Image (cartoon, rainbow, N blue to C red):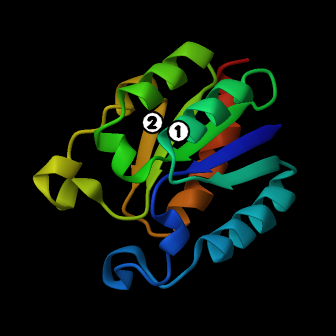
């Protein structure tokens, strides 16, 4: 089983950007924990980050036939990107939306996700544990879509 983790804009600044909201862990710290848990679950992972919407769209399109599940923290693009929504819908790879913070308890503009309707589910508000929960959910999602 293979899971692709995609991370959107500004997630490269984790650990320094608003640590009171996003925590002190860096994206590299999170990736290390995900890789450790993935090894226990015997899951291969890809882990990528981009500040560019088009690059994320390209990675989603390339995932078809290569990955069983996509886990995406689209960050601000969650609330603005029809392109990401359309790419997720087009490829048909089960996708899980994640966020470090509880977007529903924050500013109103963060309450609406354009990608949620084409995702299997959403995990938010558990900090870096959101990534581990999504990895574990990926195994369940893959088993359901066989």
Residue at 57% x, 55% y: name it.
Answer: 133
Q: Which mark is residue 86?
A: none
Crowding around mark 1 (Cα neighbors within 10 Å: few <14, some 14 to 19, many 20+) is: many
From the top left corner, tell me how far across and down residue 14 is, in percent. Answer: 49, 75
Closer to the camera, 68 or 89? Answer: 89
Residue 105 falls in image quadrant: bottom left
Q: Residue 79 sits in which quadrant?
A: top left
**52 relative position to 31: left or right:** left
Residue 27, given in percent of the width and then of the height, sits at 60, 70
**Is residue 97 shown above or below 22?**
above
Q: Which of 75 and 143 is in front in this view?
A: 75
At 22% from the left edge and 53% from the top edge, which residue is drawn?
104
Rendered position, 76 above or below 145: below
Q: Camera-side residue: 25 or 80?
A: 80
Point out which mark residue 121 bears. 2
> In the image, which disc is placed on residue 96?
1
Is disc 1 placed on a helix, strand or loop? strand
Q: Would you say the residues marked 1 and 2 are in contact, meaning their CB atoms lie under 8 Å apart?
A: yes
Instruction: Say whether residue 18 is left or right of residue 120.
Output: left
Compared to residue 143, the image places residue 51 above or below, namely below
The answer to which image quadrant residue 83 occupies is: top left
Residue 127, how many percent across, how many down?
A: 45, 69
Q: Count every numbered label the image shows and give the total.
A: 2
Q: Tell me the crowding category of disc 2: few under 14, some 14 to 19, or many 20 or more residues within 10 angstroms, Cα based.
A: some
Element type at mark 2? strand
**Residue at x 79% of width, y 57% of height:** 38
Quadrant where the C terminus lies? top right
């Amino acid at each position: 089983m293979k899971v692709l983790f995609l991370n959107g804009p500004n997630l490269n600044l984790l650990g320094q950007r608003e640590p009171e909201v996003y925590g002190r862990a860096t994206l590299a710290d999170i990736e290390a924990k995900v890789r450790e848990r993935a090894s226990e679950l015997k899951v291969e992972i890809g882990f990528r980050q981009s500040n560019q919407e088009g690059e994320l769209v390209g990675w989603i399109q390339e995932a078809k036939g290569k990955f069983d599940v996509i886990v995406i923290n689209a960050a601000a693009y969650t609330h603005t990107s029809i392109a990401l929504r359309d790419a997720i819908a087009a490829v048909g790879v089960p996708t899980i939306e994640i966020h470090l913070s509880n977007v529903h308890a924050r500013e109103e503009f963060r309450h609406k996700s354009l990608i949620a309707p084409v995702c299997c589910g959403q995990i938010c508000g558990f900090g870096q544990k959101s990534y581990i929960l999504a990895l574990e959910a990926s195994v369940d999602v893959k088993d359901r879509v066989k």
